[in-house]
Image (cartoon, rainbow, N blue to C red):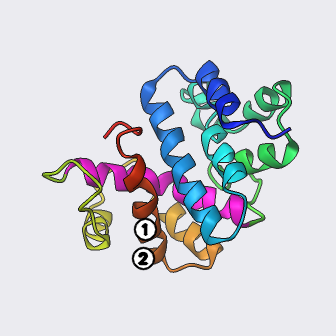
Amino acid sequence: MTPTREQALNLIRQHNNEESHIHHALAVEATMRHFAKLYHEDPDLWGIVGILHDIDWEETSSAPETHCHKAPDILREAGISEDIIHAVQSHGFGICTDIEPSNNMERTLFTIDELTGLIITAGLVRPSKSLADLELKSVKKKWKDKAFARGVNRDIIKQGAEKMNMPLDDVITETIKALRPVEKQIGM
């Protein structure tokens, strides 16, 4: 089954207690919904995948190589459909899984998971502490500074943009646009 948004939020909250992880799920949800509209796909489905993508993070964070491995059991127990499970697993491709993203939804999730963190961090260090005035140029400047948001794997983002067949600058710009309307909900 494809859960409702409320069911997905309840499920992610059952497995993630840290509010920062919920904020991340909401950021990825908003970005996935945005890109679904660009691809003329189902924004509700893409949003659900965004919410659920890190369902096992808190259970696996001490051994990151196991991330995405407990998710299938958690999601199957909740009756979640296999296409959502596959998408969740594929966002860890090359990091913690060998399940390659195979459609637009999966390739987008793979790309923007890391990128949302970089963009939010770039917004938080602005004098406005907002995404409202964040531009591509500022993100690109932060991108080059390897000490900035050092946990963000820029190679994954570049690889993902290539998989999406979209210029990196466009992926960054669209992600900024996606996050602006939800900045309060994601803890900014």
Q: Position of residue 106 (x, y in %)?
A: 70, 58
Task: Count the labels in the image.
Answer: 2
Dominant secondary-structure state across the stretch colored magenta: helix
* Image spot of residue 34 (x, y percent): 55, 60
Residue reaching furthest to the left: 127
Q: Assess disc 1: are there few (<14), some (14-19) or many (≥20) residues with their C-alpha within 10 Å of its C-alpha.
A: many
Residue that badge 2 annotates? 169
Report the front residue among 186 and 88: 186
Up/down of 139 relative to 182, above or below = below
Graded by Cα atoms within 10 Å as few (under 14), some (14 to 19) or many (20 or more), the crowding at tag 2 reads: some
Say which quadrant the N terminus sits in: top right
Say if mark 1 contacts mark 2, CB within 8 Å: yes
Q: Amino acid at mark 1?
A: Ile
Q: Residue at x 29, y 68 (%)?
A: 144
Residue 172 got which mark?
Answer: 1
User: What x and y, as percent, mark residue 157?
Assistant: 51, 64
Q: Position of residue 141 (x, y in %)?
A: 25, 69
The quadrant of the image that shows the C terminus is top left
Bounds of the magenta span?
104-125
Image point (64%, 24%), residue name: 10
Residue 111 in magenta? yes
Asked where in the image residue 8 lies, by quadrant, the reply is: top right
As measured in the structure, the alpha-carbon distance from the residue carrying label 1 to the one carrying label 2 is 5 Å
The three-letter code of the residue at mark 2 reads Asp
- 47 magenta-colored: no
| Residue 55 position (above or below residue 47) | above
